[in-house]
Image (spheres, rainbow, N blue to C red):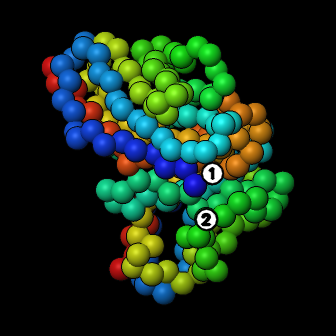
């Protein structure tokens, strides 16, 4: 079974600064996808970015980018130019190709301060 | 942008009662899921549903849970006899296709409170 680890304590980041959220995972499978979701205080889960295990390029989506290091089994999310609306819980998740379920980490809390 | 719609947003129920949580998937999505998130904890997979049948379920999804898509649009999660520990946020998610890069899109959740 896959395991996702997000161990950073809550983070405060200055508006307009970049922030990196750590995610490591453990799986014996070679084919998988990694996803990041944002959960604001209102509770909804918003998909941010996807990285496939065979993708050679790091994924980018607007202000979000993924620092994917397959050998280290890490998929850190970088949020550039933080905005107040980025304050939320961020979840890293993995799906083994061919399976259905997403396995989530415990999340990283980010608070953006003006 | 199309979205997954869940109703109700909040449900308060007495222990032992049955509850039905409803989800309207994004049109033309084929894969449907239920997850739950106990307060302050991580999101946990319950069940996936494709082609009108369960394709995968977790150990949490025991006999008190069931899912169906009764009218081809709504996707429901039924909890037959609720327990205090069923109190959680329940998320419906849908996915367009089986493509590996297709994300699961989540609804806003139903907060279930068991008294």
B91 in relation to A98, above or below? below
| SS for dot 2 | loop
Q: Dot 1: within a 10 Å radius of its alpha carbon, few (fewer than 14), some, or many (20 or more) residues?
A: many
Relative to A92, B105 lies left or right: right
Residue displayed at 42% across by 15% down: A63
Q: Chain of mark 2?
A: B
Residue at horizontal 41%, vertical 26%?
A77
**Can residue B26 be seen here?**
no
Which chain does tag 1 point to? A
Quadrant of residue A24 within the rendered picture: top left
Q: Which residue is mark 2?
A: B58
Instruction: Give the percent coordinates (x, y) of residue B48.
Output: 68, 56
Front position in the image: A71 or A108: A71
Residues tagged 1 and 2 counted as in contact (Cβ below 8 A): yes
Image coords of residue B37 (percent x, y)? 43, 58
Nearest the camera: B54 or B69? Answer: B54
């Amino acid at each position: 079974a896959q395991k996702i680890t997000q161990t950073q304590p809550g983070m405060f980041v200055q508006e307009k600064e970049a922030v990196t959220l750590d995610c490591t995972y453990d799986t014996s499978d070679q084919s998988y996808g990694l996803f990041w979701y944002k959960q604001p205080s209102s509770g909804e889960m918003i998909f941010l970015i996807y990285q496939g295990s065979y993708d050679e390029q790091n994924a980018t989506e607007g202000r979000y980018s993924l620092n994917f290091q397959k050998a280290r089994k890490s998929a850190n999310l970088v949020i550039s130019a933080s905005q107040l609306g980025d304050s939320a819980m961020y979840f890293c998740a993995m799906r083994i190709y061919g399976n259905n379920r997403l396995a989530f980490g415990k999340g990283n809390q980010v608070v953006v301060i003006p | 942008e199309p979205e997954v719609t869940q109703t109700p947003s909040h449900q308060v129920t007495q222990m032992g009662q049955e509850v039905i949580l409803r989800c309207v998937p994004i049109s033309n999505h084929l894969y449907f899921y239920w997850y739950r998130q106990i307060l302050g904890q991580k999101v946990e997979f319950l069940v996936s549903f494709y082609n009108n049948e369960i394709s995968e379920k977790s150990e949490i999804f025991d006999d008190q849970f069931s899912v169906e898509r009764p009218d081809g649009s709504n996707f429901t999660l039924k909890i037959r006899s609720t327990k205090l520990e069923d109190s959680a946020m329940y998320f419906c998610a849908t996915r367009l296709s089986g493509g590996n890069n297709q994300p699961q899109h989540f609804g806003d959740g139903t907060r279930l409170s068991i008294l």
